[in-house]
Image (cartoon, rainbow, N blue to C red):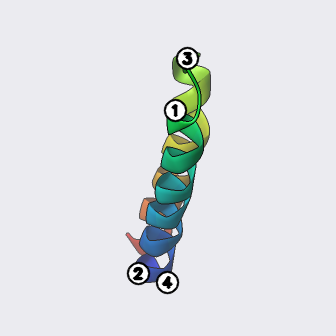
Amino acid sequence: MKTTFTLAVAAAIAFSAGAASARDQIRIVGSSTVFPYTQAVVEEFGNTS
């Protein structure tokens, strides 16, 4: 399960990198951008601990 989750995150990052490079600007909204990822990592860690 951990490997599948890691691969899914890596694939999402790889696919989003291609879309981001096509733009002139990237807008990052801070914690609201990072929160969903952080929450998923915390939940996965809680499930394995």
- Residue placed under numbered mark 1 in the picture: 34
Relative horizontal placement of residue 2, taking residue 35 as reference (left or right): left
Task: Please name the amino acid that badge 2 sits on.
Answer: Thr
Residue 47 at x, y percent in the picture: 50, 70
Task: Please name the amino acid that badge 4 sits on.
Answer: Met
- Residue placed under numbered mark 3 in the picture: 25
Task: Please name the amino acid that badge 3 sits on.
Answer: Gln
Indicate whether 43 appears above or below 4: above
Residue 32 sits in quarter: top right
Q: Are marks 2 and 4 in contact (CB under 8 Å)?
A: yes
Q: Distance of mark 2 from mark 3, alpha carbons?
A: 33 Å
Q: Are marks 2 and 1 in contact (CB under 8 Å)?
A: no
Picture residue at 43% right of the left edge, 77% below the top: 2
Indicate whether 37 appears above or below 24: below
- Residue placed under numbered mark 4 in the picture: 1
Picture residue at 60% right of the left edge, 43% below the top: 19
Query: In terms of secondary structure, where does tag 3 sit?
Result: loop
Residue 14 at x, y percent in the picture: 47, 57
Query: In terms of secondary structure, where does tag 1 sit?
Result: helix
Crowdedness of circle 4 by 10 Å Cα count: few (<14), some, many (20+)? Answer: few
Residue 10 at x, y percent in the picture: 44, 63
Query: In terms of secondary structure, where does tag 2 sit?
Result: helix
Q: Distance of mark 1 from mark 4, alpha carbons?
A: 22 Å
Q: Work out which quarter of the rendered image holds the C terminus and state it.
A: bottom left
- Residue placed under numbered mark 2 in the picture: 3
The mark that comes first in sequence, 2 or 3, is 2
Q: Distance of mark 2 from mark 1, alpha carbons?
A: 21 Å
Front residue of 12/19: it is 19
Picture residue at 49% right of the left edge, 61% below the top: 9
The mark that comes first in sequence, 4 or 3, is 4
Task: Please name the amino acid that badge 1 sits on.
Answer: Val
Front residue of 2/10: it is 10
